[in-house]
Image (tube, rainbow, N blue to C red):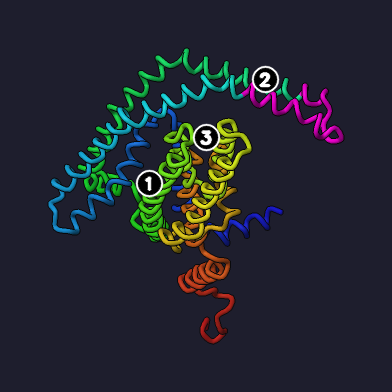
Amino acid sequence: MIEYLRNWYRRHFSDPQVAILTLFLILGFALVLLAGSILAPVLAGIVIAYLLDGAVEGLCRNRVPRRVALAIVFMAFVAILLLVMFLLIPLLLQQITQFFRELPGMIAKGQEALMQLPEHYPDFISEQQLQQLIGEIRANLLSMGHYVVSLSLSSVTGVITIMVYLILVPLLVFFFLKDKRRILVWLKQFLPERRDLVTQVWYEVNLKIGRYVRGKVIEILIVWLVSYVTFAIFGLNYTMLLSYMVGLSVIVPIVGAAVVTIPIAFIAYFQWGLEAQFAYVMLAYAIIQFLDSNVLGPLLFSEVVNLHPIAIIVAVLVFGGIWGVWGVFFSIPLATLVHAVINAWPTRRESHAHLEGQTQATAASAPPDESETPRDARK
């Protein structure tokens, strides 16, 4: 067993480049896991600065001075942040508050609809089973209410934290963009001279994630706008809230669309019941998801992120379980990183060739064994 492990280690980690790449991955994941909550503003600033740096470099390629490009991009970022703070978030909070106010009426209406099931389908569900189901639903809603109350009680601390983040994160983003080259030069002092494999992985990840993020932002805005117009035409309640959820759902393919279907169907049912309007809204939503999956997504991404649906679902489950909402949000870029590492990792044939090269080099540099030299030569 020990010999097998030794051979496995020599096959995969005999190359110093592989060891350097492994060390970088371990240190990166350990930093996020152990100090992620403390360094959250710094990590958020790094991510946002990385996303905005593409726009800065694009302006620089069009012969715009870097300082001017930095000022334009940073002012646009601050303007969008202010719009989100003072327009989008208040509107979403208003619709969420309205939803919780109308929730008891929806529950009563749903209970009346459920009480009719034993009359129409006595062989499938009894009145006792239905009462038990209603009790479980009420218990879950009560626990949800307690959770909302606990959030409201801790809202003072949350507001203070958000205010601190709103000051720190833009400052960090500005300095990361302004002093990007100085920071990179400083970091290179701590890196080994030979880092070919790390550079290869970073080049692939940078290329794919840059294209993925730009395409994903465009996709979110298009799906959000189309959903908002569609829901507004039908007169669906909570139009902004639901269309916003549909737009964000494209971040996680397949899973996001399935999850957002539940609140849309829930609100549409309690607004119209099982009438034709309910069917029209659900049909329009299905068309939006179909066009996004089969037309808009392939048009924007093509082969940028070539991941199997199973890999996407596994990435959502794994990284979401580790980092929560942020893990779900960045599940596709993290899966892209893992995919790039797997592609760059030396294959068994390459590792065997590397071991043979090391063996031949060692044999060539070793002094000749006197016991194997010809007898005449020793004389």
Q: Earlier in the sequence, mark 2 or mark 3?
A: 2
Report the residue at 52% width, 19% height from top.
Answer: 148
On residue 221, the disc is 1
Q: Amino acid at mark 2?
A: Arg
Calculate the distance from the C-alpha at mark 2 to the C-alpha at mark 1.
37 Å
Q: Is residue 176 left or right of residue 191?
A: left
Residue on which the image places disc 2: 138
Q: Secondary structure at mark 1?
A: helix
Bounds of the magenta segment: 107-132
Tag count? 3
Calculate the distance from the C-alpha at mark 3 to the C-alpha at mark 1.
24 Å
Q: Is residue 168 above or below residue 372?
A: above
Q: Residue furthest bottom?
A: 376
User: Is 379 covered by the magenta stretch?
Assistant: no
Q: Is residue 217 above or below residue 132?
A: below
Q: Secondary structure at mark 2?
A: helix
Q: Is residue 184 left or right of residue 102?
A: left
Q: Earlier in the sequence, mark 2 or mark 1?
A: 2
- State if disc 3 and disc 2 touch (CB < 8 Å): no
User: Is 129 covered by the magenta stretch?
Assistant: yes
Q: Is residue 360 above or below residue 376?
A: above
Q: Is residue 302 left or right of residue 166?
A: right
Q: Report x, y in % for residue 277.
A: 55, 41
Q: Report x, y in % for residue 305.
A: 46, 58
Residue on which the image places disc 3: 324
